[in-house]
Amino acid sequence: MAAAASAVLNPPFITPEQPSRRPNAIFWTRPISYSSSLSLSLSRRQRRLSRPGPLVAVASLKENLGRLRKNWSDLTSLNYWVVRDYYRLVNSVNALEPQIQRLSDEQLAAKTVDFRVRLRQGETLADIQAEAFAVVREAARRKLGMRHFDVQIIGGAVLHDGSIAEMKTGEGKTLVSTLAAYLNALTGEGVHVVTVNDYLAQRDAEWMGRVHRFLGLSVGLIQRGMTSEERRSNYGCDITYTNNSELGFDYLRDNLAGTSGQLVMRWPKPFHFAIVDEVDSVLIDEGRNPLLISGEASKDAARYPVAAKIAELLIRGLHYNVELKDNSVELTEEGIALAEMALETNDLWDENDPWARFVMNALKAKEFYRRNVQYIVRNGKALIINELTGRVEEKRRWSEGIHQAVEAKEGLKIQADSVVVAQITYQSLFKLYPKLSGMTGTAKTEEKEFLKMFQMPVIEVPPNLPNIRKDLPIQAFATARGKWENVREEVEYMFRQGRPVLVGTTSVENSEYLSDLLKERKIPHNVLNARPKYAAREAEIVAQAGRKFAITISTNMAGRGTDIILGGNPKMLAKEVIEDSLLSFLTQEAPNVEVDGEPTSQKVLSKIKIGSASLALLAKTALMAKYVSKGEGKSWTYQKAKSMISESVEMSQSIDWKELEKLANEQSEMYPLGPTIALAYLSVLKDCEAHCLSEGSEVKRLGGLHVIGTSLHESRRIDNQLRGRAGRQGDPGSTRFMVSLQDEMFQKFNFDTEWAVRLISKITNDEDIPIEGDAIVKQLLALQINAEKYFFGIRKSLVEFDEVLEVQRKHVYDLRQLILTGDIESCSQHVFQYMQAVVDEIVFGNVNALKHPSKWNLGKLLKEFIGISGRLLDDSFVGISEETLLKALAQLHELSSVDINNFYLPNLPTPPNAFRGIRRKTSSLKRWLAICSDDSARDGRYRATANLLRKYLGDFLIASYLDAVQESGYDDAYVKEIERAVLVKTLDCFWRDHLINMNRLSSAVNVRSFGHRNPLEEYKIDGCRFFISMLSATRRLTVESLLRYWSSPMESQELFVS
């Protein structure tokens, strides 16, 4: 066996490099490195004892060649020349800086008014861009103590140009957004800065909002739980911070509003310019999940637990097969027979007793939806974990019965089935913006998709300092157990050195498994995952993650919004010191671990040295807190006490030291606790800054943050997000990915791993030994690229299908907003158009312009016409027969001219004289012109006769309606309220049914591919047919409802006013 291994690994024509020991080694494992594409790690003891070899010079030469190749690649890339062009703007901004710095605060703030005047006088945003950027840079320097770097000016210009700025972690994307947001807000049409969660939206609105407010712009914030009035006020601001889901749901809710007073966005133009933070996460990762607003449909709830029991009986591979790639299941003949026998039914797909959907969903819940991976159970509810951010999403539910199936599997109370009321994908939502931009740390790998879907190029903005992070080779293990053992050993090795470590895992389950392994070795660490006890202290955990000896296990680092600063985050640490010193005095309530989180592990972290001045202020503040809570009889909850400290910390950032001292020393009946806490915080902050600076230098000397990835994601971009946590702003750092051939991605994409397992088993029986090298990296990257292509195909298909619905949605929502926000006259015009359209449909269905009227189906035409009007036309048309109508049409055909203003058919009832006044006469004339120019009408000898019949019946119906309304005695405002309510409710009812039909159609058309038909084309054809039918049904029901209402208003009043 040893000889075979030697022959494989040491062919006669290859001389192995000797492993070398470098100072400040990145990772204690030192695998033997071969010129060939495969290498195997030595045993742990051998790795540590390996000595330098003679080929260090060769490695150095390779490194230099690689650097040269990269520089040449940069010079020849389009991105290099685009960025170079932006430096002209940077030079202009820098030239203006001395002039802007000489302005007083009042003069600087007055620049906003000056810019707006110049824009009204005809200047463009491009004309004022350089000066506006210089103003924002100076405002940020004064209010935040941060000056935009030159590369951040480039980032702001990229955003303003409607592109995606790719900026590495720690390069200050949040500050960059202020440039483009300010410039575009000057037009007064509103700017949306979109983040991935409420926490980031609130943080950015408060933090960056200081710059905008200082310059005289209004800043709004949209948060979950806000009232309609609060949302309306915040959307009306110059710049609004929100998260992507709140924005999407507000848009959908506005298009379900019953009155214009319920609208919260800026209608009729709610969208102007958006800056999307983590744009790749929003538009690509979440692109597969449409936003849905659902209504409840409680039937069939009892079927889910029964189906869950059936799923337990069925055996994978025998009764059903699964496809991991697209999360689908297929019942075998045996499975169908067993399920039908257990359910005592002859057919699972019986329309009268449908069980197939419930059984399939139960099997999906069993196979694909795992507890502590896709969801957690809390307070009797199954709560979804966002796979991208690792956060719990309490308000979100899976659709199509999946969530109910999961609840049944867990034995929870089944919540009502949902029916889709409104839906939109993020792609369709953000396409509504005339101008869209985004920023992220990882988008270049998806540039083709951004260009294809959104026409947004990705511009790589160079870092302010060069990146010196070391990305170590991927290591692959035969088994998961071997991988986790090596992860634990690497963490332990780094911990002994004192280096901070961040371990990225893919699920709650994995993070807690690794946590247990580290506990066995007594290694203190912090866990950050979806469980409330960890998630509640997210900011504190991330703030500590860069300190010496800090070990952090996190489910996903996307959208955390907090940088890992080497040595620790002084602001967060100072806040922790204040909380530790004061909370026990402010409240007697103990923290609830499930709500307030577990205390972060600080066993081995160095103690922060607090100066004597800070200690004195802390003692004074603690004494005051004691008197406030006891002497004044105030009893705060733990959450209220923490909130009080947070408000005081915020106060310290917006008020200077002298003003705080003045407030703290004022004589008043109330103790000035807030200003006193703020002063103590500022004093402690100075001590923390000194401590973090010193500890940060030590951590840099040790090698910086070490990041360990425990699994490859389905996209290289997600892995790069994790890597980007190390080496921020020119800091040292290193990364290592460890994967096992039993990882889910290998199984999902049927990746052949047997060759690697066989090779390892030939060489050694030790499953803990990793394989690493070019062959492994190439295979894994190829797998990731295939996964990316597969999911791109899904997203592309979703977008193409949604584009069909997008056109229909735009038509319906535009019509809806026109009805809601239009004046009294426009509402009446809608009703008249509907009535004429319904009459036209009746005529077209029974008339052929090529044939003589005697061949027309006049009996059916009369029946349908009288049928839509209820009792309104009973008196007028009761005696009219088919023969009477035919004679009238024959006489009409013989006439050489007609008076179109007072037109009626010979020997038939004259329409009520309702078209009095210039407006109604004009409206009647417009309808006649529309009839004459109607392309949908069939040409023929008797077309003129058919058109005049349309004119007569339409006028008679509308005039009778106006006559009935006038006779009712109600004022115009009440009449229009009824009309608007009927129009909107009918449209909503049919649109909801249409969405259900379109969702069913999108599933059904895939089967047609077996008949060599294109599913997308089939979807477009049938979807168009469904939509035309839906609009026709909407018009007819609206007309019928209004005519019946005014024929007996008292009977129908409750229906439409409620």
Image: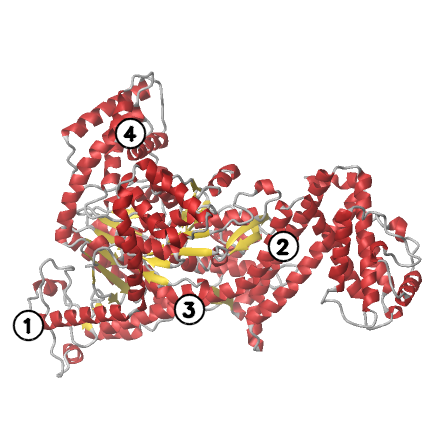
Residue, disc 1: 54
Cα gap from disc 1 to disc 4, whole angstroms:
61 Å
Residue, disc 3: 790
Query: Residue 413, percent across and down?
Result: 51, 45
Task: Find numbered disc 4 in the image and state the secondary structure of the residue it sits on.
Answer: helix
Q: Earlier in the sequence, mark 2 or mark 4?
A: 4
Looking at the image, residue 246 sits to the left or right of residue 507; the answer is: right
Q: Would residue 1009 be visible to someone looking at this image?
A: yes
Task: Find numbered disc 3 in the image and state the secondary structure of the residue it sits on.
Answer: helix
Q: Residue furthest front?
A: 121
| Amino acid identity at mark 2 | Trp
Residue, disc 2: 991
Q: Quadrant of residue 840?
A: bottom right
Cα gap from disc 3 to disc 2, whole angstroms:
32 Å
Cα gap from disc 1 to disc 3, whole angstroms:
45 Å
Pointer 3: residues within 10 angstroms few (<14), some, or many (20+)?
some
Residue, disc 4: 583
Camera-side mark, 2 or 4: 2
Q: Would residue 386 be visible to someone looking at this image?
A: no
Query: Residue 683, percent across and down?
Result: 20, 32
Cα gap from disc 3 to disc 4, whole angstroms:
52 Å
| Amino acid identity at mark 3 | Tyr
Asked whether the residues under the numbered discs 3 and 2 touch, taking CB atoms below 8 Å apart as contact, a structural biologist would say no
Q: Earlier in the sequence, mark 1 or mark 3?
A: 1
Foreground residue among 975 and 1055: 975
Pointer 1: residues within 10 angstroms few (<14), some, or many (20+)?
few
Residue drawn at x 79%, y 37% as measured from the top left: 969
